[in-house]
Amino acid sequence: MATSARDRTSEHRKGSPDGPVHPLHARLQAVHHDLSGDTGGELRSSIPLLAEADPDLFGLALTTADGQVHQVGDSGHRFTVQSVVKPFVYALALADAGPEAVMAAVGVEPTGEPFNALVLEAETGRPPNPMVNAGAILTACLVDGETAAARKDRIRSGLSAFAGRDLDDDEQVSESEKGAGARNRALSWLMKDNGTLPYDVEDALDVYVFACSLLVDARDLSVMGATLAAGGRNPVTGEQVVDAELVPTVLSVMGTCGMYDGAGGWFVKVGLPAKSGVAGGMVAVQPGQLALGTYSPPLDEHGNSVRGFKACTRLSEELGMHEFRPGGRGLPVTVRLDGPDARSSAGRTSEEEDVLAAHCSRLHLVRLQGPLTLLTADSACTALLEAAKGWEAPHWLTVDLSPIGWLHPPAVDLLQEAVDSLVDSDVHVRLVDRVRENRRPWEGATPDDTLDDLDAALRSAEDELLARLG
Ligand code: GLN
């Protein structure tokens, strides 16, 4: 009988001499244990030196969008990032040159071809997307820097910011790649010939090969991926590496093109934007949640790490990470308090108390909990509008958004519009959000006129009631 994920995990937890194990760490351990003996794949590469890697090395890491890192196996073993660098260089190019210039130079269509195919867009001659070599060679020319050396500096510092530590490069691997780089050179000259690579070919190759030779480990890849998961903000260092607005473009291209001719099969199985590299590294991102970083050198026929693919598949299944899985967004909890339960702590004179007691039913407090998504905003708007229907004007309603951990900005707009329509029927609404300062930018913002203090909002509602009805 097959063991369930739960059985496998608890087996590992029981065996630990170090006491209690974090359940996500236990998941990684179980996957690492089960795949360690998998000898599938080959050390086969366009870069001769990479074929000398130790096929048994196997590291797994997971970093959450709020910066918790879990890692097992050879997660600290350094290897060259190779093509896993491509989405991050693309992000830097979008940031430096702007989306319009980058989109004009490089397409966003998947090719269904291998990473180094001699394929350019038929009509424009542009590289089809930034995840295949042609696109990545061009993308690396679009980051800030007048010279090849300056662009290398920009790529090293940008990638270091994604990883949260200073990255070195491996000159031996870049030399090995340069010695065997006929195909990348051919691709570059094709683009040079049709006018889509308006740069010096040797400089362009030099920068691209340098980017591929940066040394990372599985932990770094998970932190780099988590930076995308967290809207461009490195959740370990707190640095905003690229603007949150650019991240959906990067993840979309990873989702559609990141796994080359294996992209469709990958997405059906794992359901996450991802990128692999020929040294055996892989990163997979669950937007808003976490990222996986894996390292295992043997590759499948598409150039993707065999154990990396299997580890991501299993973790995605066990943790329900597939992006198109319905029902993963959570439901709202709307708590409504009326009358005495919606009073502030302010001391009142006995006259004021009498007025407030007589009109207590005109005071309301609604607290929204859970993520504010389109779904929850719809149900919150319905709740507010339904509740207000039976009210005889005037009423005072305080809406507390503080318990909401995640705000989808357009959902906030819907809520604001519902609130605005209540004002027309003499319902006086105050929005309170005590945690907006702590909430990170990618989680959206509440309207400018939102108050910071719940008790003060309740008190000002009472003051208004007293002034009007007292
Ligand atoms: N530097 C490698 C190359 O151009 C990167 C390829 C890859 O990792 N898929 O061949």
Image (cartoon, helix red, strand yellow):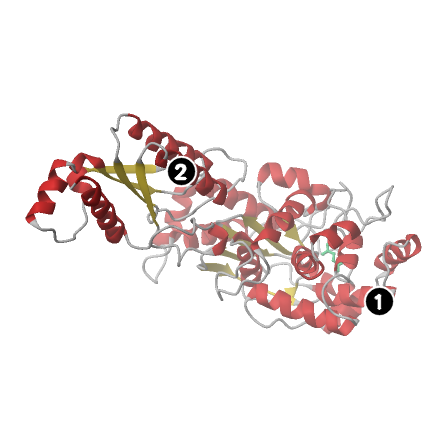
Circles 2, 1 touching at the beta carbon (< 8 Å): no
Q: Which mark is residue 335?
A: none
Q: Position of residue 306 (x, y in %)?
A: 63, 49
Judging from the image, what secondary structure is the residue with disc 1 in? helix
**Foreground pick, 329 / 335:** 335
Is there any visible trace of residue 134 in the rendered image?
Answer: yes
**Residue located beneath label 2 in the image:** 420
Kind of residue at disc 1: Gly
- Where residue 102 sits, quadrant-wise, is bottom right
- Taking 402 as reference, is 375 above or below it? above
Label 2: how many Cα within 10 Å (few below 14, some 14–19, many 20+): some
Q: Position of residue 179 (x, y in %)?
A: 84, 67
Of marks 2 and 1, which one's residue comes earlier in the chain?
A: 1
> Residue shown at 87%/47% (left/top)?
125
The CA span between labels 2 and 1 is 67 Å
Outermost residue toward the left in this view: 350
For the residue pair 221 and 104, the one nearer the viewer reads as: 104
Q: What label does residue 179 carry, if any?
A: 1
Q: Is 260 situated left or right of 312 in this image?
A: right
Query: Which residue is drawn at the image coordinates 56% and 47% (left, top)?
Result: 312
Left or right: 451 as drawn, with respect to 235: left
For this orientation, the residue located farthest to the top is 390
Q: Secondary structure at mark 2?
A: helix
Residue 439 location (% of width, % of height) = 42, 55
Split into 4 quadrants, where in the image is the C terminus?
A: top left
